[in-house]
Image (cartoon, grey):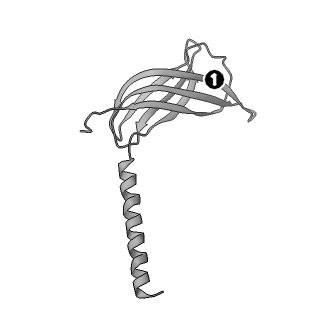
């Protein structure tokens, strides 16, 4: 490759890297995730999913519109089954980037109680990014 062609190639690569870096900064935003700390039944027989929301994004979130969680329990013999699904709506919380909000999400209905040795919680979350200053 000639020296002139090599320079053109270097310039193209540098411009591409610049645009890729600019796009990642321009499209950075909110990213809230749910982390489960435990699953148990309370004294009234309701299933409780204990955990926290964490804002892993770059903008403030001013509410959780809804979160749907599925609880898969593992029996003592190792079999798994979907034991509970529920949606919680309109959770009032302000999360700045890096902040967490701990809470217990209780089942709306009485959950059928099973003996279990493990669990897996997964689902979807929808939230609202605020126009608040990130101070």
Residue of label 1: 84
Q: Residue at x 49, y 36 (%)?
A: 35
Where on the picture, by quarter, is residue 129? Answer: top left
Where on the picture, by quarter, is residue 64? Answer: top left
Q: Quadrant for the C terminus, please.
A: top left
Q: Position of residue 27 (x, y in %)?
A: 39, 47
- Position of residue 22 relative to residue 3, above or below, is above
- Position of residue 85 relative to residue 32, above or below, is above
Q: Residue at x 43, y 40 (%)?
A: 31
Q: Is residue 135 left or right of residue 89?
A: left
Q: Residue at x 44, y 33 (%)?
A: 53
Q: Is residue 107 left or right of residue 131?
A: right
Q: Position of residue 112 (x, y in %)?
A: 67, 17
Q: Is residue 82 left or right of residue 37?
A: right
- Density class for disc 1 (Cα within 10 Å; few <14, some 14-19, many ≥20) is some
Q: Could you tell me how many numbered marks the image carries?
A: 1
- Position of residue 96 relative to residue 67, above or below, is below
Q: Position of residue 133 (x, y in %)?
A: 25, 36
Camera-side residue: 43 or 102? 102
What element does badge 1 sit on? strand
Q: Position of residue 54 (x, y in %)?
A: 42, 37
């Amino acid at each position: 490759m000639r020296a002139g062609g090599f320079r053109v190639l270097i310039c193209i690569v540098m411009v591409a890297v610049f645009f890729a870096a600019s796009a990642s900064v321009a499209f950075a935003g909110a990213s809230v995730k749910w982390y489960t700390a435990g699953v148990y039944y309370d004294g009234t027989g309701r299933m409780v999913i204990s955990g926290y929301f964490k804002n892993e994004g770059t903008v403030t979130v001013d509410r959780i519109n809804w979160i749907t969680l599925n609880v898969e329990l593992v029996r003592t013999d190792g079999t798994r089954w979907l034991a509970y699904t529920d949606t919680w709506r309109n959770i009032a919380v302000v999360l700045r980037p890096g902040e967490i909000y701990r809470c217990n999400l209780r089942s709306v209905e009485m959950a059928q109680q099973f003996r279990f040795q493990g669990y897996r919680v997964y689902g979807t979350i929808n939230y609202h990014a605020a126009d608040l200053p990130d101070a």
